[in-house]
Image: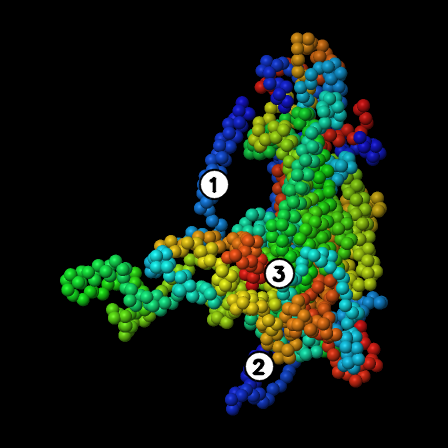
Amino acid sequence: MADKGIRNVTAVLLIGAVFSVATLAARLGAFHLPGNNQGYSPEQPIAFSHRLHAGELLIDCRYCHYGAETSRHAGIPASSVCMNCHTFVTDTLGSLRAEDERAKEEERKPNRMVSSELQKLYGALALDDEMKPTPDGVPAPIEWIQVHNLPDFVYFNHSAHVTANVACERCHGAVETMERVSQVEDLSMGWCVNCHRDVNRVGLAGRSVNASLDCGACHY
Amino acid sequence: MASAPAAISGPLILGDKSPGQVTDDVCSALERGPARSWWIAIAISSSMLLLGLITVAYQVLTGIGTWGLNNTVGWAFDITNFVFWIGIGHAGTLISAVLFLFRQKWRTSVNRAAEAMTIFAVICAGIFPLIHMGRPWLAHWMAPYPNTRGPLWINFRSPLVWDFFAISTYFTISLMFWYVGLIPDMATMRDRLTGGWRKKAANFLSLGWNGSFRTWFHYETVYLLLAGLATPLVVSVHTIVSWDFATSVIPGWHTTILPPYFVAGAIFSGMSMVLTLMLIARKTMGLEDYLTKRHVGAMCKLLIATGGMVAIAYATEFVAAMYSNNDYEQFAFINRAKGPLCWSYWIMVSCNVLTPQILWFKWARSNMVVVFVVSILINIGMWFERFVIIVTSLHRDYLPSNWTGYAPTSIEIATLVGSFGLFLTLFLLFCRFVPVIAIAEVKGVLSHGRKSHE
Amino acid sequence: MGTNAAPLLTYRDGTLRLSGAAVSVTRTGRTHELACTQDYHNIEVPEALTVPGMNRRRPLIGETSLASYKKNGTLDHHGHGGHHDLGELWPEDHQYNGHHWGMAVDLTACTGCSACVVACQVENNVPVVGRDEVRRKRIMHWLRIDRYYCDNHGEVDVAHQPMMCHHCDHAPCETVCPVLATVHSEEGLNQQTYNRCVGTRYCANNCPYKVRRFNWFEYAREDTLANMMLNPDVTVRSRGVMEKCSFCVQRIEEVRVEAKREGRPIADGDVLPACQQSCPARAIVFGDMNDPESAVSKLIAGGRHYRLLEETNVRPSVGYLGLVRNRQDDEDRTHHG
Amino acid sequence: MAESRMSNANQRFLLGVFEREEDILAATNEARRRGLDIADVYTPYAVHGLDAAMGLRPSRLPWVCFALGLAGASFKVWFEFWTSAADWPINVGGKPWNSLPAFVPVTFEVMVLFAALSTVAAFLVGRGLLPGRRAKLAYPGVTDNQFALVIEETNATFDFDEVSAMLETFGVTHIEERVDQESL
């Protein structure tokens, strides 16, 4: 009798175990170890669209993130870089054209169209409607939120990788398709090391490379 | 059967007991409420444990800087305590496994307690490498497990990794060996008790044991195999512990004699600890019939033997250094004997080499007070042996510019006291809740040394 | 001792001068433990701790007299008598095909001014631990200057020996680290990965030069103005990890990336560790030992070069150029040790 | 427990209880000499020589111990080689990639661990010893001071009285007949 009881308990336990493993396995895909921010996609102060700028308008990554070629940090562009275009482009092409046509129909000068997102840029720079600094305005930096964070004990050098012809997408994913940037890779040490080992084996952009596997290449 | 020596020296168990009496004697001690002396003992030991817990919490929160260590002396009390406790543990395995293999029937009275002592000592020992780390919360990095660091595993060339594997294996096997030995006794307890949580626990832990001889037969095989595995294991564990020092480049550590020296020392210190506890248990728990003077005498002889080995090791080490013609080696040993920490060296020599010599005399071996004092002195001496090896070697090594001293802080002393508190608390709990004597094994040797029935 | 002496100074005509105030010295009857970074100055072991046939003087300072050096071009006083090549057991496994960084320190040039010590401390964010920790012999300097006094027939001989991590090719510290926190680079650097270190201190115990430094407490302070002067290129170490001289690996890496970007090899002298950069006597030379034309290779090939504790076969990458003492009568004297 | 031998629901067993080790030993010997089928013997401790008396074959557990120990050691030595020399060879103190002598201690420990764990696990599972399992005692006191001999009444020729008489000569204190395993 007792054995039967034990058998029943064992069966229940086994079923429970299988069930828990299955549930766990389903969740495993979404499970991240501490410090792994894969999929991190914070809302930025301005809804800047990489899809539009890099994907549709085909602006090179390095036009804005020009530090990537020469320094350790790719850098977040200063607002002045934005203003190279956005001095003139104040709204989406569609709404500008629509206003132009409306103005033509109504035979008046087109009104100044400013998208709500770009207004934030001008606001940060304390510019008035004429794109002139407001007398008592104080320009403040836009507080972009860094998406790809490495721990403080890791030193990553963008210029070393750009010089070696590592494509931006290799680490940052297809940013040109993202409305809002999110972290694609896990940026773990294993991921870095395995890439270094792979390129040492197969080369990079058709050339053989010597990607260091020394701890001191990143940790010092 | 090796009954000849038993026949010569009389019965192993006094009082002409029957199996039923053995069950009664051992179990009734557990079923009675704890004595006043037990309450006093546990009050003291748990206060020591509490002190230890508080200091450990403090030092983990504040930093290892709370210890008296410095740039030159990176290990002192921590690793001394670690090696000391591991050494204590070794005697348990020796009694339970090695003496089993050698068919030494007298082990049956002491093996349960000795094995328990092993487990508790290994727990105490394991705490020190853990808390001595700068970042103990990352201790799991010692284990090889798949991780986000990709192909970065661990350094299998490091003696500390060997230690990690040796200590964890040793603990696991000791616990298992102990538990396997306990199963039949748990069944005995279960069948004696009429109810209560003890019966429930005994019922759970006895795994449905019913005394079937078919099971007994396989059980004996398992026990033999475990003893056969534990014997080389116990030698390997202290050998590996000694490699922490022997594989280094520090004069005084870098010696090939360390492994046998450490194993002999471990058995020596462990035996003296077993003797200390045995004498206390014998007196306080009324187990004079089971822990006879004959047991004490046998242990004393083992002390003389292992003490002799240790003495030879001390001498060999010294001679090897002098013979090496290596200035650093020679200095390390002269510095031990005559340097600023020479007092620890001479405590070690007088406790470990001189003290056990009194046991050559039969009157000393049969005087329990003398034996007790000797065992305590050896415990102290063996603690200082580890202190001498670790600290006197480190504090003056190659470059004189690095020479420093070392003095423990109150934190380190409190941690040592705490480890004794942990050990004694666990041991007292063990005495209350687990048959202190291996009932089934003692029943098996009742007829030894008596008139043959065959 | 240990009190503020600033009141004795006055500021006059744009310079600080001693005030000249009358000062009297009285015995207080109390003792005061000095916070001294080095309190053992003797290169000889105490006589009471020797046995017959044992050298009292440790063979740490290679030296010679000027006359002898001119005649032989080598050190005649090198303790263990010339170079020991104890051989390589596994010659094929670890070859240094690219750079092999090394350093040579000229003991004759070194005046013990400690500029290198300070430069190292600033460059590498080495914590200042304060008086109490110094008294407990827990100074954190990655680079220290060992100073030995030795009696030479009534005169005092002084030797200064800058001591930093020797980046041994057979590093005893690396073998014993359980978690691979300290391993060797392909360019001969003994690397310390702080974030991997769990703090067993085994490496420090096993270092014959005792140059490894442990963070006994959390020395880094949050949110202080002083943190503004930290070098952002070097990790600030937390409590419980080991640290040591890295040969200024951050500078090596920076030069490497720069050279790669410009498509040129790293030239001798491109990498300048902080200690070399700041040494007024140019006693410290760092460079690639695999490049026969590098300054450090030429010094190594010279007659004054020796490596410390060579007989342990740890194969250090740091070497010393022995002391040459300018004494007329040195030839006649018998050397100690 | 020897379930397999007692699976037949209507099987009959003879149970003889003794109080001394020598008696059960002699009784078992005699029972075996007479060709009786000994289902099991229940004893409070491992009585020396009873295995020979019952005619038990040597345990196969040493093979489990050997095989799993060997497997553990081989796995570990391979793992150490793979992590140190193959997966990511890192220069550690100038030691060779394959530092085989340094791998020996851990290999040994893992061998012992595997061998011991597997032997105990095989024993517990093989003998049906599981946590919480309720014990079926053949007779009260067999875990204390009683020794019980259980003989299977194999066929019609089994003579209860004759066997009882045989057991009497060895000082049996109690004899009873049981039907099927549930009553045991």
- Disc 2 marks which residue? C5
Real-space Cα distance between discs 3 and 2? 47 Å
Q: Which of marks 3 and 2 is nearer the N terminus?
A: 2
B358 vs C64, nearest the viewer: C64
Query: Which amino acid is tagged 3?
Result: Ser
Residue at 56 percent across and 88 percent down: it is C17
- Give the secondary structure at mark 1: helix
The chain under label 2 reads: C
- Give the secondary structure at mark 3: loop
Name the disc covering residue D40, or none. none
Where residue C245 sits: x, y (%)? 61, 67
Residue at 21 percent across and 61 percent down: it is A99
Q: Is residue A95 above or below residue A14?
A: below
Query: Which amino acid is tagged 2?
Result: Ala
Residue at 59 percent across and 31 percent down: it is D130
Check whether the beta carbons of the residues at disc 3 and disc 2 lie within 8 A of each other. Answer: no
Residue at the left extreme of this rendering:
A106
When asked about the image quadrant of residue D116, the answer is top right
- Disc 1 marks which residue? A25
Q: Can residue B87 be seen in this view?
A: no
- Disc 3 marks which residue? C185
The chain under label 3 reads: C
